[in-house]
Amino acid sequence: MTGRAPVIIGISGVTNSGKTSLTNKIRAHLPGCRTICQDTYFLDPPDPRLTPIPELDHYNFDELNALDMEAMVADVQSWKDAQSNSTPVGSTPDDMYSNVLIVEGFRMYALRDLEQLLMKKYFCTIPYDVCIARRGTRHYTPPDKPGYFEKIVWPESILHQREIQDQDDIEYLDGAGNQEELCLKIVCDINRLCNDRSNCV
């Protein structure tokens, strides 16, 4: 039995720009929607693939080498492939959007193998002062070392934005804006994609 065509959405952006909160809000509007979060693919120290920063006694966790991206791409591809064997139409309201996957992470679009799997791409931006203020309220394992944000986090974020600046299909969002409005906007976009492809009931 042929399943519904998959709809895969990317939500990326600057660290602490509200990506995860936004993804959770969107998911609450889409029964059965699936999510994959890039943060779950971080390598654990002292993995040799991590880049050490001797002067900070820390590792660079803000570059792609700090994540098992092969595993992440494989998981997205496996989910997509599995849709061909899924039930054509959600049998209950709770699985109506089971053919929708939201892939969320801070550094995704520069990786072609992942980027080409996405039908729609969003990128949340916030200014430096908002970013560093929010970062200070978060707890990481291992925790940020003094100077890590200024030396690594923000420069890596700027580098990533430069890497993807030629991708004209990215829609940029104000991560400091009203999240409920952003959520409803993206939900409408997803519904439109579903309806265009005759995927949703």
Image (cartoon, helix red, strand yellow):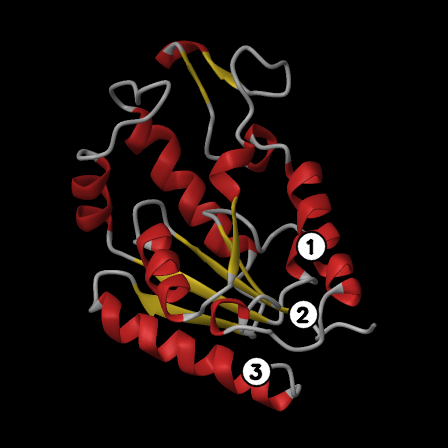
Q: Is residue 185 left or right of residue 6?
A: left
Report crowding for label 2: few under 14, some 14 to 19, many 20 or more residues within 10 A (C-alpha): many
Numbered tag placed on residue 193 in the rendering = 3
Establish if 138 lies above or below 121. Answer: above
Work out whether mark 3 precedes mark 1 in sequence or the reverse, and give the earlier one.
1
Instruction: Give how far across and how far down residue 195 sits, in percent.
Output: 58, 88
- Marks 2/1: CA–CA distance: 9 Å
Residue designated by label 1: 79
Report crowding for label 1: few under 14, some 14 to 19, many 20 or more residues within 10 A (C-alpha): some
Report crowding for label 3: few under 14, some 14 to 19, many 20 or more residues within 10 A (C-alpha): some
Amino acid at pointer 1: Trp
Instruction: Give how far across and how far down residue 119 sits, in percent.
Output: 62, 71
Instruction: Give how far across and how far down residue 197 sits, in percent.
Output: 66, 86
As helix, strand or loop, the secondary structure at mark 1 comes to helix
- Marks 3/1: CA–CA distance: 18 Å
Residue designated by label 2: 6
As helix, strand or loop, the secondary structure at mark 2 comes to loop
Instruction: Give how far across and how far down residue 162 sits, in percent.
Output: 50, 55
Amino acid at pointer 2: Pro
Amino acid at pointer 3: Leu
Question: 44 or 88, which is in the foreground?
Answer: 88
Quadrant of the rendering where the N terminus is positioned: bottom right
As helix, strand or loop, the secondary structure at mark 3 comes to helix
Foreground: disc 3 or disc 1:
1
Establish if 129 lies above or below 198. Answer: above
Q: Quadrant of residue 66?
A: top right
**How many numbered marks does the figure carry?**
3
Residue that protrudes farthest toward the right in the picture: 1
